[in-house]
Image (cartoon, rainbow, N blue to C red):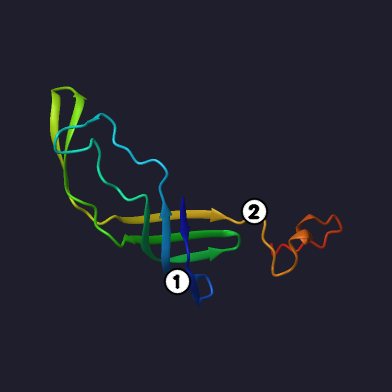
Amino acid sequence: MEIPLLIGIDIIKPLSLYAGPSLNFFNDIALDDLQVTSFRDGGPDIERNTTSINFGEMVHYNQFHLDLRYELGTKATQEELLDINNSAFGVNLAGLRSYTPKTLSLSLSVDIFRTDGTKISDLFKNDGNCGCPY
């Protein structure tokens, strides 16, 4: 689960910029077929709760939004040596190098229900006076 806390500003009518932190919560992190050895406990030591920095831009057109976001992790992972079994060649040593997570994402969203500042209950009126801006 990821909870972004972003603050944005409209630059020109269809374009807005935003930035802020993101809180990430991972429930189950595992690599398959890792073997416990005398020098490792069988898996990488990955933190379950992390933070990252987000910034990006969004273009609006009617109810459509195109969003380009860059996410940069705040901590680097640890470098580890792992034993991986059940491979084609038996047990192999694998090096997990240290890295800082970075993500570039492009997304398209569509507003299905949106009001122009009126009550949400206005979306469901049958009198033709919908609060929708479209």
90 sits to left or right of 101:
left
Q: Give residue 67's mark.
A: none
Residue neighbourhood size for the residue with mark 1, other residues' Cα within 10 Å, grouped as few (<14), some (14–19), many (≥20): some
Q: In terms of secondary structure, where does tag 2 sit?
A: loop
Counting from the top left corner in percent of width and height, residue 123 is at 76, 58
Counting from the top left corner in percent of width and height, residue 109 is at 53, 54
Instruction: Give the image quarter of residue 39.
Output: top left
Counting from the top left corner in percent of width and height, residue 87 is at 19, 24
Mark 1 — residue? 17
Position of the C terminus by quadrant: bottom right
Residue neighbourhood size for the residue with mark 2, other residues' Cα within 10 Å, grouped as few (<14), some (14–19), many (≥20): few
Q: Amino acid at mark 1?
A: Leu
Q: Is residue 110 above or below residue 9?
A: above
Q: Which residue does the image show at 29% across and 36% down from the upper left?
A: 31
Q: Give residue 112's mark.
A: 2
Q: In terms of secondary structure, where does tag 1 sit?
A: strand
Q: Residue 120 or 28: which is nearer the viewer?
A: 28
Counting from the top left corner in percent of width and height, residue 46 is at 29, 47
Q: Which residue does the image show at 35% across and 41% down from the upper left?
A: 29
